[in-house]
Image (tube, helix red, strand yellow):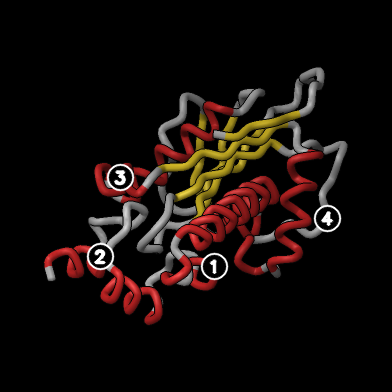
Amino acid sequence: MQQGGLDFFADEAQLVAGVDEAGRGPLAGPVVCGAVILDPNQPIEGLNDSKKLSEKKREALFDEIKAKAKAWAIDEKSPADIDRLNILQASLQGMADAVAALPVQPDHVRADGNKCPPVPMTVEAIIGGDASDPAIAAASILAKVHRDRLLVALHQQHPQYGFDKHKGYPTKQHIQAIQEHGVLDCHRRSYAPVRRALEA
């Protein structure tokens, strides 16, 4: 769990947190969830769906969001969590845990997608929210950059799998590596290509 924020005096305005996840589709690594409360007095230019930004732009925004947001937090749910809960429930729980970890609690939460995380405040799900809501976009950037860094670190330990390139997604190279070198602890055993490799 990572978190941070600026000290500030709350005003009458409602505090809204945006939440999003990165890594629902991969065969390996955690699903990472971000939660961000932006500071209207410190606007951040260029916020967008993390998938629509270059890696260089995401990295720059990652640092800027941490520096300027009223509050932010990042939560990880492990492959074991995903296998136990299923990926949807792990993602929703990760979003809720990221919100709970915010050093300043929001009045309202906006989540990307069509499902609401189980949070104690009012919450709405916004399809395509990572491209339309700045706080959700900021959360998507924190989640994506944090997760990509974890997978690059995983590559250092297991270079034969190519995690630095595919970030755990089910590419031809990744599935071939699983078949040749076996299943790792970081793999999600409930996902069909991994399950098939274990059965074989």
The residue located at (66%, 23%) in the rendering is 104
The residue mark sitting in front, 4 or 1, is: 1
Would you call the spot at circle 2 few (<14 residues within 10 Å), some (14-19), or many (20 or more)? many
Among the two numbered marks 2 and 1 on one chain, the one whose residue lies closer to the N terminus: 1
> Label 3: which residue?
80
Q: State the quadrant of the C terminus.
A: bottom left
Which residue is farthest bottom? 172
Mark 4 in CB contact with mark 3 (< 8 angstroms):
no
Which residue is label 1 attached to?
164
Q: Earlier in the sequence, mark 4 or mark 3?
A: 4
Alpha carbon separation for disc pair 2 and 4: 40 Å
Q: Determine the residue positioned at 56% across, 60% down.
A: 152
Locate residue 92: give its quadrant.
top left
Decide which of tag 1 and tag 3 comes sooner along the chain: 3
Secondary structure under tag 1 reads helix
Q: Secondary structure at mark 2?
A: helix
Q: Residue furthest right?
A: 41
Q: Tell me which label, 2 or 3, sits earlier in the chain.
A: 3
Could you tell me the amino acid type at mark 1?
A: Asp
Q: Quadrant of residue 9?
A: top right
Q: What amino acid type is highlighted by mark number 3?
A: Ala
Mark 1 closeness class: few <14, some 14–19, many ≥20 residues within 10 Å = some
